[in-house]
Image (cartoon, rainbow, N blue to C red):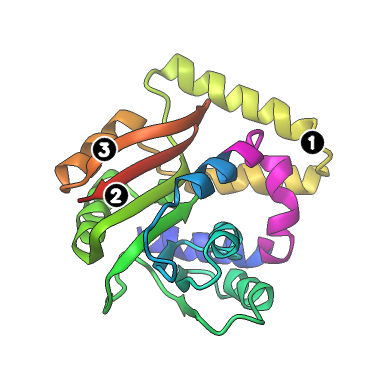
């Protein structure tokens, strides 16, 4: 897995400058995914502590910051290149901390009102996902929310192949050039997807309540869970 994480870091460093502009061309349901995640981010604290796992360029965090301008954000990502884009994006904000680190190994020193992640956890193995959910439960405040925008494995081989074929058709007609398409396909070799049902069960096993899939388009999903 260490080699996988090195590859993830390298590939996302390489794509960092083009990452945001490619999002809508690589994600058929981009608006729905990020819109749903933002709508679900409800907290009574008008200056919530927010943890963004695999934060990348800070895209999802930017939506949260628009909704809660007083948010105190912690962004963690393996890729320094991606975080440099995030630092530029949030250059006028002083309430953001950045860590170029592996969030599985990170030493968390505070509790969070909201934990978010977008298109990152599918790089973890099954065991790592379970370990992460347990860790998150321990560092979240009572009443906090976990929102995971991600990709999942189809429950059958037929469905999984259907999802992949639909995605390939979409990106080949998206306006991306062949180099960008090839790069995107190459990055999928780093995926370690688990099924949706597995992950909802692991969230429940970790102690979370109301674990559910709030939005789904093929293998793109928005998962939700609460710590009560």
Task: Name the element at disc 3.
Answer: strand
Residue with the mark numbered 2: 129
Instruction: Pinpoint residue 43: horizontal percent, then vertical percent.
Output: 39, 57
Quadrant into which the N terminus falls:
bottom left
Residue 56 - label: none
Disc 1: which residue: 174
Q: Residue at x 44, y 67 (%)?
A: 46
Q: Residue furthest bottom?
A: 94
Query: Number of callouts in the render?
Result: 3
| Earlier-in-chain disc, 1 versus 2 | 2
Nearer to me, 89 or 169? 89
Spot occupied by residue 87 in the image (x, y as percentages of width and height)? 62, 78
Identify which residue is drawn at 80% across, 30% down: 173
Q: Residue tagged by mark 3?
A: 210
Quadrant in which residue 16 is drawn: bottom right
Q: Secondary structure at mark 2?
A: helix
Residue 16 within the magenta-colored segment of the rendering: yes
User: Does the segment drawn in magenta span residue 80?
Assistant: no
Depth check: give the residue in front, 130 or 149: 149
Residue 4 lies in what quarter of the image? bottom left
Residue shown at the point (43%, 33%) measured from the top left: 214
Residue at the spot 33% in from the left edge and 63% down from the top edge: 113
Give the camera-side residue of 46 and 225: 46
In the rendered image, the vertical position of residue 220 relative to residue 136, given as above or below: above
Magenta stretch bounds = 15-32
Mark 2 neighbour density, 10 Å: few (under 14) some (14–19) many (20 or more): many
């Amino acid at each position: 897995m260490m080699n996988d994480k090195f590859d993830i870091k390298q590939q996302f460093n390489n794509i960092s400058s083009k990452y945001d502009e490619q999002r809508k061309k690589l994600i058929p349901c981009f608006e729905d995914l990020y819109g749903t995640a933002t709508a679900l981010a409800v907290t009574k604290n008008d200056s919530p502590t927010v943890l963004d796992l695999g934060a990348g360029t800070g895209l999802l965090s930017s939506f949260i910051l628009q909704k809660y301008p007083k948010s105190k954000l912690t962004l963690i990502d393996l890729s320094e290149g991606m975080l440099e884009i995030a630092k530029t994006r949030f250059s006028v904000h002083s309430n953001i901390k950045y860590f170029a680190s592996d969030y599985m190994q990170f030493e968390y020193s505070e509790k969070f009102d909201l934990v978010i992640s977008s298109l990152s956890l599918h790089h973890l193995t099954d065991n790592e996902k379970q370990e992460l959910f347990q860790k998150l439960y321990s560092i979240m405040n009572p009443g906090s929310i976990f929102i995971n925008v991600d990709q999942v494995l189809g429950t059958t081989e037929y469905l999984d192949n259907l999802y992949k074929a639909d995605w390939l058709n979409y990106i080949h007609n998206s306006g991306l050039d062949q180099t960008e398409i090839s790069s995107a396909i190459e990055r999928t070799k780093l995926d370690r997807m688990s099924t949706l049902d597995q992950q909802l069960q692991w969230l429940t096993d970790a102690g979370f309540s109301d674990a559910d899939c709030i939005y789904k388009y093929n293998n793109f999903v928005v998962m939700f869970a609460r710590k009560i």
